[in-house]
Image (tube, rainbow, N blue to C red):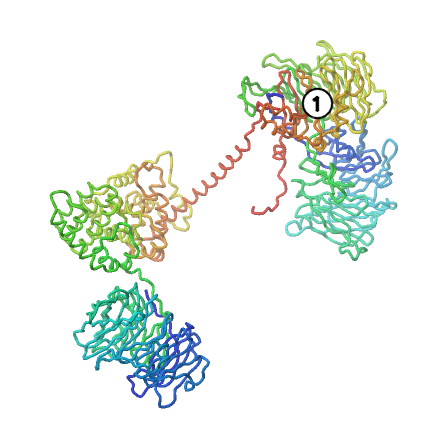
């Protein structure tokens, strides 16, 4: 196969932000995740936990709680606003000032007719959910002290509110507080501190379960307002609570990073009637506060300060070991944050607040495989471009020649002209962009840098012609399907003829850019494409989906290629299908048209289409074996998938025109080391 | 050392009419080692369980009958045998209740004793000296018994000994003041008669004790004048010798007898070196003779003594680590322990004979030789001497052989010996030297110890410098050199001997410390060590502190000023005092040698306590001086020079403080020294704790470097297949 020179890049200081809130929509199987920077991510749990949509954050926005009402997503934050999101255009639809000070929590009743918010000023405000908006209805009796957490009784007639040192139960029709449950303070030094009831759930049998800052999980009888049981689960705070749909299980998240499950079961087999809440399992998948929790049908989903989303399957819900029964950690976004100018050897790193442009280093040495070459020139940070305005950067692009740079926020698109001669770099903002170019979900330059494609609303693509003097709107490419979903992937061919787009409806459109019209629609596959690329010579479109399937579609012939059919017929190797991170980049080797380069977080793969496909019995990860074999024996052991796991925590892999690979790694350890210190825990022998 | 344990009483004794007679005829064992068969002097035999101190059974003959021999246990048939009225042999078993109903056989002659021993058949010894196996006697009781002894010869004592295959009956007789030993071998039967040497007083022995050791029968006997002799009869050989032989004897022990002669006394051999004696006065309590003592015959020392209340009948039996002593109105059992004494090596007493005599004493030390001396090898000695004399006569002008030199050492004048040894050492091939150096040194030391005028420092130094010597080969050497104030030799020994005992190290230390400086300064010592010490002292004299180092010593003091307020001048004095070496140069050199001697602190500590307070303080001052010197980096150690390490110094300080802590605390002149030491140590501890911190963070750095092997950016080459 051959040797590659690899630029091993570790200077991309990508830092995800902490998870603050999550809400699971059981109907659509979508998980909404709110992060500290105000961004919202939507994961499709029906499609291999694929990160379908990302709504970029905004400096002024904070998310304290998320709430689904049907297919609509609401958030509330300490800025005192309630926001509804436009999931088709990936932006807030509107924000509403609640006039109650910072909002700590938002929750809807089971009927989906009302939203209740808990405010700093001690009011619980009810909002009516209307067709296109929400409307303030009334306040419940105002209390002293802030309302931290809320939970509707499934009947919708009562609301439990967690406050400082107490829980209040409100009668919704009258708005009166009917119960006052006093929560004990912690022991010792924390006795003087108020207990914050961080989380509360109201079950249909009028049991109230609360978690508080004294580390207690308490079970109350909502009828009488009496304490039934106290479980002291941690020395620190119990931050999050989530109840399963059938109300037989409650999970709590603590500051220690543990998730503890309580189940409503009979303590002995004989007395099946006398059920009680029993602490059953403890999971420790986090190092920091677990701030957000959701118990879904088969798993516990948790997230917190350590920024990773953990899906912990409940193994008793599975009959056999399968893809779904494996623990899954989602650490990296399922989209590209790194763009590579293949000709110029430049790297563009996208941060929420800035862009960084780097020039790769150089080495003229040669070495054996496994060697590190001496550097002739060190990598150099050419540019640090801060965004304008409050909105975070949602996408960016770098032309392959390195002459153009574009980024978009929710409110604007900016285009820059870059000029590098030797060591000097100059950047010029291109003024007067076409008015129609307001924002983009995806940006992409044509390979000859003559056009800029911007994915716009309703899966349309704006084509902008670029020249030295001006930039001009050319055309809007519109899909025939009339899909309203945003485009999350966009790629064009090297010859400048084709443009392929993929949206969240799993539709892939191929446009003829020269004729400015839709060329074809690739047959819709049930899983969302996570990466795609058009082959430079054959113009075949290679797509990799969230379920790890690979397709190759001939754009010219408008049909799947023979290789793709063969692959589908034989099926992919189980080890390939068992990988738990999606492929996020597809690229090709112009010098060797048989080769397709793919990568996910944990591996980098070259598919050689000229080699036989592996069947289930073949040794899939065979690089070590091949290395040990002699030159003559090797060919009989070769198969199409050449997988290299030397590089881990990969954010991007690309192939420069000089045939050297660029691997951008972001070691998880480096992310962990930048996290704030976790709560102190007594460990053995410390 | 031998010890007598706390005894206990087995049974009470009934006083006989004649007070001088013992109420007990004999004590024998039966097959159970915890049993004792006690035969009293009249009619009864009692079986005791010793550990329980209670009788298990008792058998008595009828009134009017008399037991004339102690009952014995027949180990083969598991029966008891006793003789009543001289002629009636009675045999009974454990379960028999009545002795009268037991088996009886009347023999034709008077029986003296029945002897039985484990592993052998019981033997009957008649009063006239004939010996029969019990079995054969009982099968034909009326068989005629011949007379072996002459008319007036009477048996005084008898014993039977069973060796591996041989069965001996020993008995001694007395006739007109002449004592004879008969050794009767059984199967085949031979009888050998020996005449015991007459004691000057004409008295006959009070007691005998026989034992078998190294295939020799050892007979130990005690005379009323307190002399204990030992005679050795070979267990094999001499069979063909006819007639009466004189039995040579050696004096093992001369017991103090006080006024008059011993009356009823007895000695029994416990092992090679130990003898238990009853009825002999205790040397330190000269009032009575009612003592049980254990003596070491090698050293003529009393090892243990115990007063036995009441009259002692001169009887003692020894079985299985217990002594059975009838005294007063009781029969006491006293367990004893004899350990092989290592006093011999400590005092160096025994070796003289061993080393001086035997050619076989080579440089490799043998514990046996060291501790117990070689078995005296009379004949070899004579041959050896003769041979060497011959060879000496035939000596030419050439250099002497080792043996010749050895011979010369015994008598020759100092310079000749010196010269010959020098020649021998300078010529010697290594193989030979290895063996001969030890011998030469031992002989030289032996001679010097014997004659104070004889001392050959040069020869000894040469021998030591061959490095073939070690302390255990020639234990007297170092002490001898100390005695002669030959400090150069001392230093050599300390440097080159790997095995100096702690007691000797301590003796050296003591001598070195107390020797006046003037005495040592004249002595020439090993130049390297002297130059090291000069360097050390000079380092202080230069005084300059390099690298901006300031010893934190006195700042520390001022820190806890409330604890020890000191005027500043005082401090200055101390500093000055510390700058000067508290001992002379050469003395310091010698002390350094002591510091570098290997030791084990457990053994050293007791001997260190022998130092007196002044010595301790001086030594401590010196140690502190060296310690301070080492701690200040003004002094950099010269590589290759033999010098005490920091650890050695600190170890010695610790040991010294351990040994004399209370004394030092009490001594007023040690107070300043100790507080200085404390504050310095405190500062050092602080320094080291800081160093510890630095070490751990540096180590952390090291770890990090390992993991941060991959940098932010690198260009690598990979190969895919």
Number of residues whose C-alpha sits closer than 10 Å to that of mark 1, classed few (under 14), some (14–19) or many (20 or more): many
Residue that lies at the very extreme toward the bottom in this rendered image: B64
Q: Is residue A330 above or below residue B102?
A: above
Image position, residue A564 (x, y; %): 76, 23
**Extreme residue in the top direction:** A469
Q: Which residue is mark 1?
A: A586
Toward which corner of the image does residue B129 lie, by quadrant?
A: bottom left
At numbered mark 1, what does the secondary structure look like: helix, strand or loop? Answer: strand
B357 or A256, which lies in front? B357
Q: Is residue A145 left or right of residue B315?
A: right
Name the image quarter holding residue B315: bottom left
Q: A190 or B182: which is nearer to us?
A: B182
- Residue at 20% over, 52% down: B443
Report the quarter where the N terminus of chain B lies. bottom left
Closer-to-camera residue (A244/A518): A518
Residue A170 in view of the camera: yes
Q: Is residue B147 left or right of residue B555?
A: left
Q: Is residue A191 above or below residue B550?
A: below
Q: Quadrant of the C terminus of chain B?
A: top right
Foreground of the two, B574 or A3: A3
**Residue A459 image position (x, y, % from top left):** 81, 22
x and y, in percent, of residue A655 in the image: 65, 20
Q: How many marks?
A: 1
Quadrant in the rendering for residue B191: bottom left
Name the residue at 84% across, 24% down.
Answer: A483
| Chain bearing mark 1 | A
Residue B583 visible to the viewer: no
């Amino acid at each position: 196969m051959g040797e590659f020179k690899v630029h091993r890049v570790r200077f991309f200081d990508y830092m995800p932000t902490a998870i603050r809130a999550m809400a699971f929509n059981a109907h659509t199987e979508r998980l909404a995740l709110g992060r500290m920077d105000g961004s919202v991510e939507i994961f499709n749990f029906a499609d291999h936990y694929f990160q379908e949509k990302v709504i970029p954050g905004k400096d002024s926005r904070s998310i304290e709680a998320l709430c689904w009402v049907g297919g609509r997503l609401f958030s509330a934050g300490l800025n005192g606003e309630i926001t509804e999101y436009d999931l088709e255009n990936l932006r807030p639809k509107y924000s509403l000032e609640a006039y109650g000070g910072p909002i700590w929590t938002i929750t809807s009743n089971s009927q989906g007719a009302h939203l209740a918010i808990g405010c700093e000023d001690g009011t619980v405000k009810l909002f009516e959910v209307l067709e296109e908006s929400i409307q303030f209805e009334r306040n419940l009796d105002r209390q002293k002290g802030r309302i931290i957490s809320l939970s509707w009784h499934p009947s919708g007639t009562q609301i439990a509110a967690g406050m400082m040192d107490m829980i209040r139960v409100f009668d919704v029709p009258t708005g009166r507080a009917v119960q006052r449950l006093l929560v004990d303070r912690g022991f010792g030094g924390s006795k003087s501190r108020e207990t914050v009831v961080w989380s509360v759930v109201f079950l249909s049998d009028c049991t109230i379960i609360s978690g508080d800052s004294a580390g207690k999980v308490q079970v109350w009888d909502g009828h009488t307002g009496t304490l039934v049981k106290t479980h002291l689960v941690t020395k620190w705070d119990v931050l999050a609570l989530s109840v399963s749909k059938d109300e037989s299980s409650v999970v709590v998240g603590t500051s220690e990073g543990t998730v503890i499950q309580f189940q409503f079961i009979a303590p002995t087999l004989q007395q099946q009637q006398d059920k009680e809440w029993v602490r059953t399992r403890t999971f420790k998948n986090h190092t920091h506060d677990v701030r957000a929790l959701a118990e879904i049908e088969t798993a516990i989903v948790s997230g917190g300060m350590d920024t990773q989303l953990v899906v912990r399957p409940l193994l008793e819900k599975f009959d056999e070991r399968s893809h779904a029964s494996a623990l899954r950690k989602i650490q990296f976004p399922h989209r590209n944050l790194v763009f590579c100018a293949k000709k110029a050897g430049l790297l563009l790193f996208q941060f929420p607040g800035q862009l960084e442009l780097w020039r790769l280093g150089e080495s003229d040495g040669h070495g054996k495989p496994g060697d590190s070459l001496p550097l002739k020139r060190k990598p150099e940070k050419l540019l640090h471009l801060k965004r304008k305005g409050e909105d975070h950067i949602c996408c960016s692009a770098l032309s392959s020649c390195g002459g153009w740079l574009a980024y978009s926020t929710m409110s604007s698109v900016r285009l820059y002209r870059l000029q590098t001669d030797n060591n000097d770099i100059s950047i010029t903002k291109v003024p007067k962009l076409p008015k129609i170019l307001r924002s983009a979900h995806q940006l992409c330059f044509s390979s000859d840098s003559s056009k800029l494609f911007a994915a716009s609303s309703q899966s349309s693509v704006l084509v902008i012609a670029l020249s030295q003097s001006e930039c001009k709107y050319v055309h809007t490419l519109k899909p025939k399907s009339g899909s309203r979903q945003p485009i999350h992937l966009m790629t064009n061919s090297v010859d400048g003829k084709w443009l392929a787009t993929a949206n969240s409806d799993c539709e892939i459109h191929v446009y003829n850019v020269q004729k400015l019209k839709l060329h074809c629609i690739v047959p819709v596959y049930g899983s969302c494409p996570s990466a795609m690329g058009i082959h430079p010579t054959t113009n075949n479109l290679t797509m990799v989906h969230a379920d790890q399937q690979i397709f190759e579609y001939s754009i010219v012939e408008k049909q799947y290629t023979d290789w793709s059919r063969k692959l589908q017929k034989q099926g992919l190797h189980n080890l390939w299908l068992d990988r738990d991170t999606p492929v996020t980049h597809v690229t090709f080797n112009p010098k060797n048209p048989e080769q397709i380069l793919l990568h996910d977080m944990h591996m980098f793969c070259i598919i050689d289409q000229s080699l036989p496909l592996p069947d289930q019995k073949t040794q899939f990860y065979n690089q070590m074996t091949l290395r040990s074999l002699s030159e003559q024996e090797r060919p009989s052991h070769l198969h199409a998938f050449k997988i290299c796991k030397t590089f881990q925590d990969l954010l991007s892999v690309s192939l420069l025109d000089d045939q050297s690979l660029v691997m951008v790694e972001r070691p998880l350890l480096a992310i962990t080391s930048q996290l704030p210190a976790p709560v102190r825990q007594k460990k053995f022998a410390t | 050392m031998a010890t007598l344990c706390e005894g206990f009483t087995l049974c009470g004794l009934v006083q006989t009419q004649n007070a001088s007679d013992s109420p007990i005829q004999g004590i024998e064992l039966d097959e159970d080692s915890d049993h004792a068969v006690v035969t009293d002097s009249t009619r009864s035999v009692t079986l005791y369980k010793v550990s329980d101190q209670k009788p298990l059974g008792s058998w008595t003959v009828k009134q009017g009958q008399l037991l004339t021999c102690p009952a014995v246990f027949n180990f083969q048939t598991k029966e008891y045998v006793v003789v009543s009225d001289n002629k009636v042999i009675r045999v009974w078993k454990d379960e028999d209740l009545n002795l009268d109903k037991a088996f009886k056989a009347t023999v034709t002659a008077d029986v003296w004793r029945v002897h039985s021993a484990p592993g052998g058949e019981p033997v009957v010894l008649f009063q006239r000296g004939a010996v029969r196996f019990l079995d054969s006697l009982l099968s034909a009781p009326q068989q005629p018994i011949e007379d072996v002894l002459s008319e007036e010869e009477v048996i005084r004592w008898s014993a039977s000994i069973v060796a591996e295959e041989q069965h001996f009956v020993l008995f001694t007789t007395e006739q007109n003041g002449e004592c004879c030993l008969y050794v009767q071998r059984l199967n085949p039967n031979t009888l050998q008669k020996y005449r015991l040497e007459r004691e000057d007083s004409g008295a006959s022995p009070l007691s005998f004790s026989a034992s078998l050791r190294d295939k020799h029968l050892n007979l130990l006997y005690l005379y009323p004048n307190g002399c204990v002799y030992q005679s050795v009869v070979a267990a094999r050989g001499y069979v063909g010798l006819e007639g009466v032989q004189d039995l040579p004897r050696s004096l093992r022990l001369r017991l103090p007898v006080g006024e008059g002669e011993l009356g009823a006394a007895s000695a029994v051999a416990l092992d090679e070196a130990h003898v238990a004696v009853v009825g002999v006065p205790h040397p330190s309590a000269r009032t009575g003779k009612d003592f049980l003592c254990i003596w070491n015959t090698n050293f003529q020392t009393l090892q243990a003594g115990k007063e036995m209340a009441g009259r002692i009948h001169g009887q003692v039996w020894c079985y299985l680590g217990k002594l059975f002593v009838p005294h007063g109105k009781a029969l006491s059992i006293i367990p004893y322990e004899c350990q092989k004494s290592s006093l011999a090596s400590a005092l160096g007493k025994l070796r003289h004979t061993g080393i001086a005599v035997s050619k076989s004493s080579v440089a490799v030390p043998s514990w046996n030789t060291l501790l117990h001396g070689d078995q005296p090898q009379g004949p070899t000695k004579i041959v050896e001497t003769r041979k060497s004399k011959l060879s000496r006569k035939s000596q030419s002008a050439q250099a002497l052989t080792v043996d010749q030199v050895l011979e010369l050492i015994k008598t020759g004048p100092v310079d000749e010996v010196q010269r010959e040894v020098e020649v021998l050492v300078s010529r010697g091939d290594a193989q030979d030297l290895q063996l001969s150096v030890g011998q030469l040194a031992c002989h030289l030391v032996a001679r010097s110890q014997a004659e104070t005028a004889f001392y050959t420092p040069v020869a000894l130094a040469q021998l030591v410098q061959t490095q073939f010597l070690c302390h255990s080969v020639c234990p007297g050497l170092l002490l001898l050199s100390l005695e002669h104030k030959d400090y150069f030799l001392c230093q050599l020994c300390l440097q080159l001997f790997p095995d100096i005992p702690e007691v000797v190290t301590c003796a050296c230390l003591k001598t070195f410390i107390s020797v006046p400086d003037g005495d040592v300064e004249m002595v020439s010592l090993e130049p390297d060590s002297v130059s090291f010490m000069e360097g050390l002292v000079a380092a202080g004299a230069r005084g300059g502190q390099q690298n901006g180092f300031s010893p934190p010593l006195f700042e520390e003091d001022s820190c806890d000023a409330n604890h020890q307020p000191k005027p500043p001048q005082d401090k200055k004095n101390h500093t000055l005092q510390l700058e000067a070496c508290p001992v002379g140069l050469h003395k310091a050199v010698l002390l350094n040698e002591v510091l570098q001697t290997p030791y084990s602190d457990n053994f050293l500590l007791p001997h260190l306590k022998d130092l007196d307070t002044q010595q301790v303080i001086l030594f401590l001052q010196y140690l502190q001086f060296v310690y301070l010197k080492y701690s200040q980096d003004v002094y950099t150690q010269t590589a290759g020079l033999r010098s005490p390490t920091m650890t050695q110094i600190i170890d010695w300080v610790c040991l010294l403080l351990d040994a004399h802590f209370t004394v030092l605390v009490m001594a007023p002149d040690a107070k300043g020294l100790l507080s200085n030491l404390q504050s310095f140590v405190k500062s050092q501890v602080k320094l080291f704790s800081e160093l510890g911190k630095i070490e751990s963070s540096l180590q952390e750095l090291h770890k990090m470097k390992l993991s941060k092997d991959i940098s932010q950016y690198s260009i690598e080459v990979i190969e895919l297949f």
